[in-house]
Amino acid sequence: MPENLIEITDLTKIYGAGDVAVHALRGVNLAVKRGEFVAVMGPSGSGKSTLMNILGCLDRPTGGSYVLDGEDVSRLSKDRLARVRNRQIGFVFQSYNLLPRLTAVKNVMLPLLYNGHQGLSDEACQARAVAVLEAVGLGDRAHHRPNELSGGQQQRVAIARALVNDPSIILADEPTGNLDTQSGEEITELLHQLHDGGTTVVMVTHDPDLAKHAERIIYLLDGQIASDEQNGMRRE
């Protein structure tokens, strides 16, 4: 098993062509070890959303390579990328992205269903989803719909959904951006717990206070890494 979960080499992403071409990423080189907690920061237009989309196999680079868990995924077909997304990557979005008509447990079960149940029965899928909800402190809300949950609880459901397939990495995009201070602190603590349990977390954020919780902070500017530093302020 390779030490680095992510290895990016000379990564470029260009939108458009000719005079209107936008160079979103300009030769990015980056490695993330298993179990790291990394924050990615930068102003609007710096390339951090483009980088997150490529890390999440939602988009392909124009040039360079992206190796995830030992496999070069930068040139995979759409179908194979979809399988990698479902089985190896857990997404946590600022807006939760829950289906409003489904209960919490049904939302959490969705990745299992997309993954062909992983050979599990419907009952086993539901049991796994309930177990993950319990792990994030929402076992008593398993049969509530999103509109019956607070913002912090909805984000916990989203994190449970991200975890249910036991992914290699959690990608969190502004995970506390829509939350009040207390709920944001609770979600930050949950991310700490996941990291302390060995989960690799890469988080995009504009919030320097949130970034301080990561053990490494990468700052993007104009499609390039301007700085990449260990975070001495992270809590012990």
Image (tube, grey):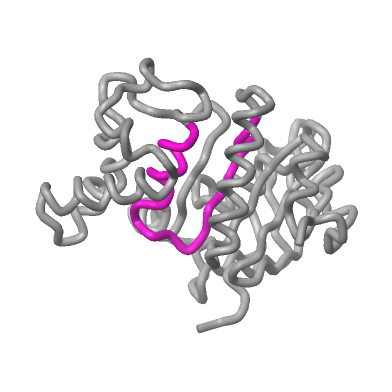
At which x and y percent is residue 65? 62, 66
Q: Residue at x 58, y 39 (%)?
A: 187
- Compared to 198, does 124 lie above or below? above
Q: Residue at x 36, y 17 (%)?
A: 148
Q: Residue at x 14, y 58 (%)?
A: 120
Outermost front residue: 140
At which x and y percent is residue 40? 74, 48
The reply, left or right, for residue 63 in relation to residue 69 is: right
The reply, left or right, for residue 167 in relation to residue 201 is: left
The reply, left or right, for residue 36 in relation to residue 91 is: right
From the viewer's side, name the closer residue of 61 and 139.
139
Task: Give residue 121's quadrant in the image.
Answer: bottom left
At which x and y percent is residue 63? 65, 59
From the viewer's side, name the closer residue of 175 and 50.
175
Q: Residue at x 31, y 46 (%)?
A: 111
Task: Provide the residue span drawn in magenta.
Answer: 155-176
The reply, left or right, for residue 90 in relation to residue 177 is: left
